[in-house]
Every structure is written in C-alpha cells, then in structure tokens.
Amino acid sequence: MSRTILDVTDLRKDYSQRRGLISMLAGRQRVIPAVDGVSFYLRENETVGLVGESGCGKTTIGRTVLRLTDPSSGRIVFDGRDITRLSRAELRPLRREMQMIFQDLDAGLNPKMRVHAILREALTVYERPSDAEIARRIRELLEQVNLKGSKLANFPSQLSGGEKRRVGIARVLAVRPRLIVADEPTSALDVSIQAQVVNLLRDLQKHLGLTYLFISHDLPVVELVSQKVAVMYLGRIVEMGLAESIAHQPLHPYTRILWSSLADKRSTEVNLYARSGATAARGTWGVFDFEQPVSGCRFAPRCPLYQDKGRPAVCTDPASEPPLRDVGKGHVVACHFA
Amino acid sequence: MDAPLLAIENLRTYFYSRARRAFIRSVDGVSLHVAPGETLGIVGESGSGKSVTALSAAGLVSAAPGVIGGRIELRSRQARRNLLDGLERYVRVKERDGRITAVEKDDRGWRRRAETLMEGVRGKEIAMIFQNPRSALNPYSTIGAQLVETIRLHTSVKGEGEARERAIHWLERVRIDSPRLRFDNFPFGMSGGMCQRAMIAMALSAEPSLLIADEPTTGLDATIQSRIVDLLAQLKIETGITTLLISHDISVIQRLADRIAVMYGGTVVETGRAAEVLAPQAQVRHPYTAALLASVPTPETIRRKSYLQAIEGEVLDTIELPRGCRFYGRCNRVTEAIRENCAGLEPPLGEVAPGHKVRCWLYPASGKA
C-alpha cells in the first residue's frame, strides 16, 4: 500500500463575521465555523473527491491544507511533517510540492504576460535552469497538457477557456508538485471541454504519480476520478468511503439526497417524492444557515429520515452530534440511524 | 399538429467584437417552432447561440448590431404578429468569403419599430426567467411588491388587495413556504433557490403565452437544482404553459423537454422529439449530439473507470465560418465517402424521420432538405 502523503486531523477554520461598529465595540463577534473538525488522509497517487453544496467548506479545506489560509486549530501533516504552524519561510520549500488548481480560469494567469513568460516564471521560481533547459521544459509542459506551441505567444485574454485551464495546469506542473488540490477544475468549462480536462488530469496522475484532492460539485465526475469520496455538510464530513460505495450504497441521508437529486434530474417522470415531499420538506430546502445554531445533528432540520422516524430526540440532542462511525471497509458515516 | 405558438425562421443575430475587430455570427439562420403546450429544449455549449436565440425572441438583444433579420412569428390568443415585421429595411449586411465586413443598421428606426411590435408582448405574452435570479430581481423592492406590480401591469387584476391575494397564490404555487411572510422579504434575504422560485412566480403571474427559461438551474446547488426542475415539471403539468427551455445541461433538457434542438456554431444541427434524439440506442444522430452525450460520465464509464469521449478542439467561434460543415474540424465520424462534402459544403437540416431533422452529410435524407 502506498504511503500517506497528507494527514489532516480535527481541522477547524473559523471566520469571524464583521458586523457593525457597535457590536464590535461590545465584543459581540459572530464566529462562523466554515470547517468544523474535519479529519481525512490522502495516500500517494490517489484521488480523494470532496463534494457538498456551495458554502459547506470544501474550498476552505482545500486552501487550509495547503496553508494558503491558516487553520484555527487541528493538525496538518504533509509527507510526515507537521506543517500546521510552519512559518512562511519554512513553508516555502514545501510549496512546490503542493499546488492548487483554482476554480477561476484566470487565477494565476497574469493578463499582461504571454503564455511563454507565465511558464518561464513558474519554472524559475525554485530553480535557476539554463535557457536551453527552460526551452526543453516548456516543450515538455506543452506536450503534457496537450497545448499547441503557437499559443506561447498569446496573452491569456486570447485563449479559450479550455486553453486557459491547460496553461493553468502547465504552470502548476512546472514546479513538479506531488499533491494537487483541484478546486472545481472543470466547473467553468463547457461540457465537451470538461471531458478533455478530466481525461488530462487522469493521464497526468498516471504518468507523474500525482495525488489529488478533487473538490467538485459534479458528482459523476467525482465518482469517475476518485478512489475515495468525502461528503461534506455544513463544515463537517458526514460520510466518507470508497467512491462506488458512496455513490451506490450511501448510508447518510444527505449523501442519498445528493446522488438521488442527480438521478431525479435525469428521470423523465415527475418525481412522486417531490410532490408529496413538497409539503413535508417544504421550507427546509433552503440553503443551510451557519447563523442558526443547530443542536445535535446539523442535518436534522433538512433530514427526511428525521421526519420519517417521527423526529427522534437523539437527533436534536445538543449533547450528541453524531460522530463519524466506522461501518467497515474504511467507510465512515455520521448518522444515528445509518 | 397544432399551428406553432412561436415560429422562428432564419433568425440572424450578429455582434461586433471590438477586441477581434470582427463580426460574430452568434445566431446564424436559426429556424425553430414551439407548439402550444409544448416544451422545446435548446441545448448547446456556450457560444452556440442558444441564449441569444431566446433573447432575440424576447426582443432583449441590446448590443450592436444585434438582430439582423428573419421572422419571429408569435401566434397567441392576444397577439398574432411577426415580431421582426418590416425591420429588414433598416439593415444592410456586407459579406465577403464567409466573413461579415460591414453591417449598416439604422438603430433608431429599428428600435422604434421593434418597440411598437413588442408592445404588450414582452413580459406579458413572453415572460422570461434567467440564470441568475438574484440579479433579475429588484434588490430595493420586496418580492411581494414586485409580484403585485407585475400582476397589476399585465393582468386584468388591477385592485391592490386583489393583486396581493393573487401574488400570494403564485408564491404558493411555486412552493414557497409561508408565502404571507415571504411576501415582505427582500431578495437578499432569500436563498438562490428561493429567488428562482420567486422569479418563476413573477414570470407566470403575468399569465404569459410563452415562458422562456434561460438556464434556470445553472449556478444553483445540486439538490436545489433538482427541486427547481421538479417544480418546473409540475408547473408544466398544472399550467400547460408553452416553454422555450435553454440549458447546457442535457439531463435538465431530458427531464423537461418534449422536443429538443441541438445548437452548434449559431445553427440548429439536430432537432426532434426529445425521447427520440436522446434515446440511448438511437441510430441516427448528429455526431455533435452523440459527442455531447458521450462527454458526460455514464454509469458505464464510471464502472469501468474508462476515459470520457472528449470532443477534440475548441468550440467554434463564428467569426470566420468554415466553407463546409461547422462541426467538420471536430467531427470524428467523417468518412472518405463524404469528406469532400463535409469540407466544402454546409449540409442542410434534412428530415431523416418524421419530425426528426439532422444537419449532417452522413444521412442521405439530408440531401432533399
């Protein structure tokens, strides 16, 4: 079995919400726990998918494990080394080993630099290669991401979405990373281009032995590329396991809803559950709310199982937020009834 | 078949790109029709012209030069007219070698005429819902006030109290919880899904003949998306409203549309009954439609962990049109027998089966058009 490259334990990231001057002076700061005690690990050359609705903390996790954002508490171990409290200077040599692909296609592409200069800059951040070596590496990068040499003279604004994504990936590959956090790498692209990028990322993983933390809300893509999938809800992982078990034998009601919503959209018949459930679940389908303190299970207010079981007290008992339980084969779930 | 409620013929809408110093043929000869009570789904990638087709139909294209010509025939109970009637005389297009060199448009004359034609149509006969509901709603006014305004403007209900009751009724119909409370909410206090529901309520409250839904689920979360699709499916049954649905998400189209039109590079490349065009075992299919369907992971690709069938190349930009088929450069089904045609001559949209048309040289029926 390959070794663990990233090990995250009880990671927390609180954001304090800025409010009016008076409440600030009165010391009434509202704290939003964007990531609320998350643990997971990544093995070398493996892909872990991170799914959940917008605002559930996926991106915050991605940024925090790379120390682009500082965690509030918890422990991040990269390749056997605790990086939770490393200073910027200490982090610098590690940065080249862990990189991020941002959702925004333009992120990291200086609009005033030509593609050639962008790649050259990336190649010379950590090393001082000769010009011949730079030329060789740029050719290699273009080949790796399947980009035409003629694009080197272009500015980012002259590139299509797919090309921008490829340049972004080439730029990341230039420093030869081992771990890549890919934050919604396909969501800004057209369907036909999405497929190209998904294939490319998988190819690169195979050839370069990369490890991915793949953040996405596109469930079929996540299922396709990932070995393991973690499902997040309101800053917590509520279920994690092998991609196929998460997709086909989900245990947590939220995971079930996520995957069934996909099937619902595809089915050609009007969903009966939606019609009858419209009354039961009405109003609870809004986006979750960090400001509303939940006691007990944070999914209970939206949970169909909670309704079906006649609102059991254990679900809303403040003393018992369901912990992640191991149900075998590395599958963990946080639900009293799973 | 019923006479279509909306018939678009040879619609052309162009834009000028200052960065590229060239004209973009965003919609380039599109013909579509929507029968009363029917949902027509338009699917395609960004830049295919699907949204611009819809915006043109609603008379909402503002960038220059905009709509150039064609017919947009609306035949509802209240209005029967060609929304582009007599507008050709304000436009002259010069073209050389598949490239537009100049468009002369008397914008003022066009606008005056177009606004007369649109009177009592936009908002009333043709209502629209957009991709980003929050930006389509007025942030300074409550949901209720906006609904009341729409109702009093577009329907026979003119009294304040009566309009209020009607508004609450519509909020209920789009399954907004506690509509009487929500009535006084501002858009910023509501989630994206809730705003989209309010948007749908507003569009339908005008009792339009045609609803144009432009990417109604894009940008919403997965679970919310499926709720909105559910809602649209239910409203379709309850109200029987004629709908022009635009989406890049084939699964949404599959769920809601009776017929579909696949667009590529500003033209319709395939159209037919949704069940027929999207059937997994369909024999006749435009290569682009086939490729679009194959580029999303299916249970089969996931199980085998196989590669996705990507469409090579980039989405066509419609500045310099190829002489032949617009999809030729990316097509993987060109055979030697038809290559010459594909490269040199744009295929017509030919009928391959009753009601099923494909723009491709692979299908012999295409010849007769």
Image (tube, rainbow, N blue to C red):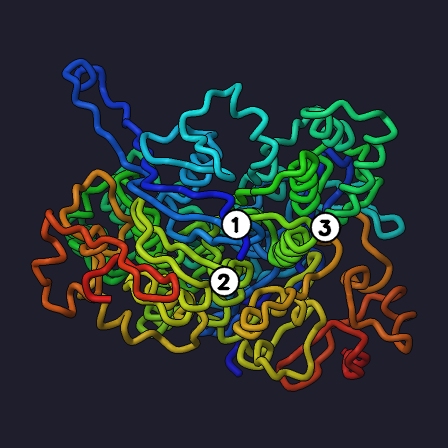
Q: Amino acid at mark 3?
A: Arg
Q: Nearer the viewer, residue A26 or A252?
A: A252
Q: Which mark is residue B25?
A: 3
- Asked whether residue B45 is in view, the answer is no
State the image quarter where residue B229 is shown.
bottom left
Choose mark 2 or mark 3, whichever is in front: 2
Q: Which mark is residue A223?
A: 2
> Residue drawn 50% across and 74% down?
B35
For the residues beneath circles 2 and 3, the answer to whether they share a chain is: no
Disc 3: which chain? B
Going from the N terminus, do you reach mark 2 or mark 1 first? 1
Disc 1: which chain? A
Question: Element type at marker 2?
Answer: helix
Q: How many marks?
A: 3
Q: Position of residue A77 (x, y in %)?
A: 44, 37
Residue underneath mark 1: A3
Q: Nearer the viewer, residue B234 or B367?
A: B234
